[in-house]
Amino acid sequence: MSFLATNGLATASVKARPSAFAGTFAALVFSATVVTACVAVAVSAAGVPASAEQAELSDMGVAFSLLTVYMSVFVIGQVMSLAVAQRRRESALLRAVGAGPWQIRRMVATEALWTALLALPVGYGLGALLARVWYDGMAGQGMIPDGMALRVGLPPLFAAAGVLVVSSQLGGMIAAWRASRTRPWAALADTTVQGGERPGRVRGFASLVFLVGAGALTVAAGAGSAEDAASEIPLVLLAYLVSIGLAGPWIGRLATAVAAPLLRGLGGVAGELAVAGCRARSRRLSAAITPIALVTAFAVAKFVSLTGAGDPDWMEIFGTLLYAGFAGLVAANTLVMLTLERLREFSLLRTVGAGKQQVVAVVAAEGAVTALAGLGTGALAACAVMVPLGGKTGTPIGGLPWWAWAAIAVCGFVLVWGASCAPLCRMLRVRPIDGVTRRSS
Amino acid sequence: MNTVLELERVSRTYGRGPHPVHALRELDARLYAQSLTAVTGPSGSGKSTLLQCAAGLDRPTSGTVRLAGREISAMGERELTRLRRERIGFVFQSFNLLPTLTAQENVLLPLRLAGERRDPARARRMLARVGLDGREDARPGELSGGQQQRVAIARALVTEPDVVFADEPTGSLDQETAAGVLGLLREAVSAYGATVVVVTHDPAVTALADRVLRLAEGRLVTDTAEAGMPV
């Protein structure tokens, strides 16, 4: 009975803020899709009689599978904690009417489980399609070893299910722990800044631990063989990214401080509002920075490794596109979630007399800070890995031409501005007075 | 007496189909400059709709609204935005202030949105008028509910608007704090010549008003001005 009761809470909570639920759902579908596609290709390649072609294909499949699993765990954790943080008010209300911390945690866990179960078949279906496209492409290039056929089957389903359930539960647990600790009245007040809580010491310490760990991994990879180093690069990058994710609020503040004079000077009132917003919402800023850093770091590292690879084959290109697309979609998804939660704020601005373009200008100015911080830290992480290891694997980072850096920066800004402003069309059609009185999006 | 706000046969209907909601039915009203008008009535009587139509936040289904001689019911979104910024002040029941800005920045917001230079002295003067000198740099989270309403009033008055609209401004305050906020609105009229329209349930507000409009089912049922009471 109590399980059912908790379920009721979870349903109510989802209804209260559909955008947060949709964001989690989308991230879980993306993850299930890439994991299914990679595992399907890896398993199909592993089942064929051994040959040089088969070994290469199988190794690559395994490498891509592992990478997508790591990335999925990372992004699902991020998105879950954002979704829970966005529902802070609802959790606070539940706490105020007597829900215990464990009930909040149960609610989040139940919701995470249901979301994962709903996302799994969708992601599995899309992943199977994606694997087919990938396989046909390889077949077209004559890369398929004799006797290999694409079999999607059960292993990718189990892999995707495992990743989704485990990582959403883990992400939910961390987020729920925070939500269950909030003091109800503070969170219910209209005047608290959503996402403005000060980051704790534990978070700072954990960030340092991952930073040191990433450094140690780099040294260890540098001491091993060139082949091992190449395969360890993504893992080291992820360690740096976890550290960046944890340090996000501080990075956001730093980027705001750097950008503030420029935004104030050039952006007028929109720039000022953006600076004030970025300062006060460092945690939310962090949620936006991390996925941008993720795309940037992997794009830079991949481009560097491609400079020395001669002509990359279809497998490699497709795999790279796959996870770059995945990371990009996750980043866009997060940015959309972050804009959607601000209907009241934008509506209030408009009742006071802000024009639509002024609201767009505020979002664009904040996006500039996000892009700057995300691109900057992502590039730094890539350099921290590729400067010591790039030479060893035969692809020094200096080999990356300037236009590749410029292209990455342009894509980053386009992604941030496009995704943050996309929901505005609809949000600015809401009558300002309705937006002010509406409780959530 | 100068008419500041004129509503002529204003109707507002929500929804279509077999059961539309008639929030306002052909309502006529004129409001005079430098007065405090209270609009009251039971829930669903149309008083909030009246305020929204009068303030250019909503468009009447039929009828005209004129503010300081200009027909606002025919204005486009861009013009209405400018109107809100320059000619109208708002005070809501809650969520009046941007939580990321200080009291001073909140007060100056309409001026800054209009492209004027930042003028801290002006914000300080306004905040002093509402009894908040020294709290310029406080953020809304650090202010009490009554203090936040005072900041909102300072922001509403800073542009010297034609009309200040307040929707249940004392709705979430205790009696004593509410009396303070109400005193400020009264003072805005008597000392600074503002025109204030308050939508309220609060008998304390109606007692202090120059004129009370009572609505029921989208129609005006009592107007103390017409009943020959002092205006």
Image: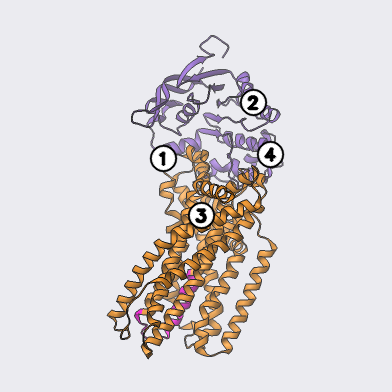
Q: Is residue A168 left or right of residue A60?
A: right
C-beta proximity under 8 Å, tags 4 and 2: no
Name chain A's colour.
orange
**Which chain: purple?**
B
Discs 4 and 2 lie in a common subunit: yes
Q: Is residue A259 visible?
A: no
Question: The residue tagged with tag 4: helix, strand or loop?
Answer: loop
Disc 2: which residue: B187
Residue B14 location, x and y as percent? 40, 31
Residue B125 belongs to magenta span: no
Discs 2 and 3 lie in a common subunit: no
Viewer-nearest residue: B99 or A441? A441
Q: Is residue A231 visible?
A: yes
Q: Amino acid at mark 2?
A: Glu
Q: Amino acid at mark 1?
A: Arg
Residue A214 location, x and y as percent? 60, 77
Q: Which residues are magenta?
A: A295-314
Question: The residue tagged with tag 3: helix, strand or loop?
Answer: helix
